[in-house]
Amino acid sequence: MTATLGARPAPGRGRARARHRLTVLGFMAPAIIGFVLFFGYPLIATVVFSFTKYDLINAPEFNGLDNYTYMFKDPLLIKAITNTLWFVVVLTIARTVFALGVASVIARLKSGVGLIRTLCYLPSLAPPVAATLVFFMVLRPNGGPVDNLLGVFGIDSPLWFSDPAWAKPGITAIMLWISGDLMIIILAAILDVPQEQYEAAELDGAGPIRRWWHVTLPTISPVLLFGIVNSVILALQLFTQAVVAGSAGSGAADATGSTKYLGFPDNSTLTFPVYLYTQGFRYFDMGYAAAMATVLFIISFAVTIVLVQRMRKNSTAEEGGPGA
Amino acid sequence: MTATLAKPPVDVTADPEQPPRKRDIGGFLNWVATHAIGLALGLMFATPVVFVFLTAVMSDDQAFTADLWPREWHWENFVEVFDKAPLFQYLINSLTYSLLATAGMLISSIPAAYALAKLQWRGRNLAFLLVIGAMMLPPQVVAVPLYDTWSSLGLTGTLWPLIVPYFLFDAFSIFLLRQFMLTIPQSYVDAARVDGCSEFQALVRIIVPMAKPGIAATALFCFLFTWNDYFGPLLYTGEVKDQWTLSLALATFKGMHIVQWNSSMAVTFLTMIPAVVLFVFAQKSFVKGITFTGVKG
């Protein structure tokens, strides 16, 4: 990123420099327009809308901090925040540990790597709606495959997407099944660990587990941090799986007019984005939805900064290299 | 694990004075254990889809039971679901969204990625940070004003609010393409400039041919992302059924349209096919692309 190769504008040549600027502008023009229209403007507008009462039909009406003060009195919002925090903690830990575990096993394989890597990765390409329905079928308590399996051990299957205590673990199971992208990223990092480091550790008498703990883990820690940040972002915006699991679980799957079923069972799948969507686009309380969006923006911005800091550190560490 | 344990049965290079038998047996058992776990993992990931498929070909009655294996194979289930819901319409909507968005993305993102990867200009680092920021932003954050705008243009209820942005700006694609282009040595671009190529010619003649695998990977991710998208179509076309995409329609299949497990699983299975086909044909691009998003950050 800091490399100054191919510095186009020759010093002292004003016209060449102006032309260079025009070229850059030409290449970037669509992106600049798109960014302003679809990110710059709506971000500012969201904050502005959050201080208004707006139903999409009548003009927005300034109402100060009403939307924000209402948040503290809204039991459903507190429920939604609790649910999303549950996912931020549980999903982040489970997804990172699971992906690391699977990648570590694949990295040790000597044959069949390609096939097993493909099998582990493919589910992450499936539409999230399909993945949710897959688990809805596999986990169904009345004779589904998992129910059959548990029956062998004499265990009663949980009710999963019909039980407030099990709906979130069920969604977490879906998210682990489709975590193949993170697995591939961690696997690539493990395979990139210089072989000499393992040989040195082996000479010191370290067994496979100690080599993994003292060599592999510290070397890939930047990628693990990426995995954690990536999982936090994923948990913060968890929407599709929650909506589909909720509506399928309630037995009234309907993409449109079934507001009362969002969050089924007992609001246990009502995540923050789902509640934002409900308020904004079912009840058309756009002002309140905008206030929630502002809160979501501040939180995800903070998380993004952690990631950018990490990348900065990396790019200074390998300065001059092709990667940034 | 080091390469010395790679070939389990006999270590050819072994010193005869220190018989490596014991270690070989240990290494062999280790090999068996690791591969057993690996195989179990692979099966664990594959079995849910196998069950979906087996349920999809069951008869209506059997699909309600706890049976895992179909008594008769009803292949026609995959055809009959097309009568139970307007799947063709949904398929055309999905293809319209995915293909147009991918085409638009290629037009808008390749030049932007080139400017971010290979041109020197003030504000480039800031621009790249904004791309990352946009990439990490939950789509729900900007949904209210965008819906408001598209609604005042009378375009809610269509897929255009989802397609048009790709012709201008797609953060993830710009990011991924830039990462790919950074791996192309600068000297190629410099050589083209010395030969009198304009920046546009350098992009079209040098960078694009060299970045083909990267462009392919980015296009695949874009296609699948839009194919899989649920929030976007729900937001803009939720009320207008004949504009639904497959992903959105699929969400309604368990319960509203179709009660039988076999039919809903047949549709579920069908929607997963494009991903598998694309992956089989472009496995290398996928793996390379996904690695780029993480390792090179």
Image (cartoon, coloured by chain):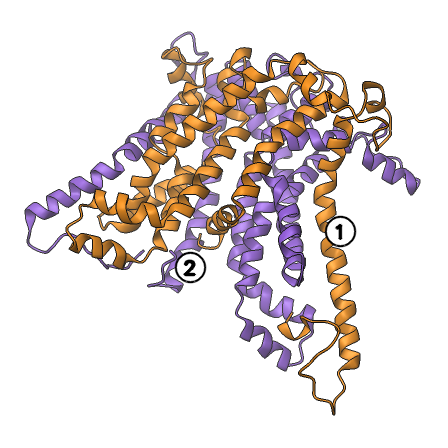
Chain colours: A purple, B orange
Which sits in the foreground, B14 or B166? B14
Residue B41 screen position, x and y as percent: 72, 50
Q: Is residue A50 visible?
A: no
Q: Is residue B94 visible?
A: yes
Residue A205 screen position, x and y as percent: 67, 80
Badge 1 element: helix
Type of the residue with mark 1: Ala
State the CA–CA distance, disc 1 to disc 2.
36 Å
**Residues packed near mark 1 inside 10 Å, few (<14), some (14 to 19) or many (20 plus):** few
**Residue located beneath label 1 in the image:** B40
**Residue located beneath label 2 in the image:** A314
Badge 2 element: helix
Nearer the observer: mark 1 or 2; the answer is 1
Q: Is residue B183 above or below residue A133?
A: below
Q: Is residue B106 above or below residue A253?
A: below
Q: Which quadrant: the N terminus of chain B?
A: bottom right
In the rendered image, the residue lying farthest to the right is: A154
Residue at 74% of width from left, 37% of height from top? B50
Type of the residue with mark 2: Asn
In the rendered image, the residue lying farthest to the top is: A58
Residue at 51% of width from left, 45% of height from top? B286
- Residue B157 numbered mark, or none: none
Determine the chain carrying the residue at label 2.
A
**Drawn side of residue B177 relative to residue B236, left or right:** left
**Residues packed near mark 2 inside 10 Å, few (<14), some (14 to 19) or many (20 plus):** some
Q: Which of the 4 image quarters holds residue B185?
A: bottom left
Co-location on one chain, circles 1 and 2:
no
**Drawn side of residue B5 relative to residue B166, left or right:** right
Q: Please report contact status of discs 1 and 2: CB closer than 8 Å, yes or no.
A: no
Which sits in the foreground, B164 or B134? B164
Which sits in the foreground, A82 or A126? A126
Residue A94 screen position, x and y as percent: 66, 47
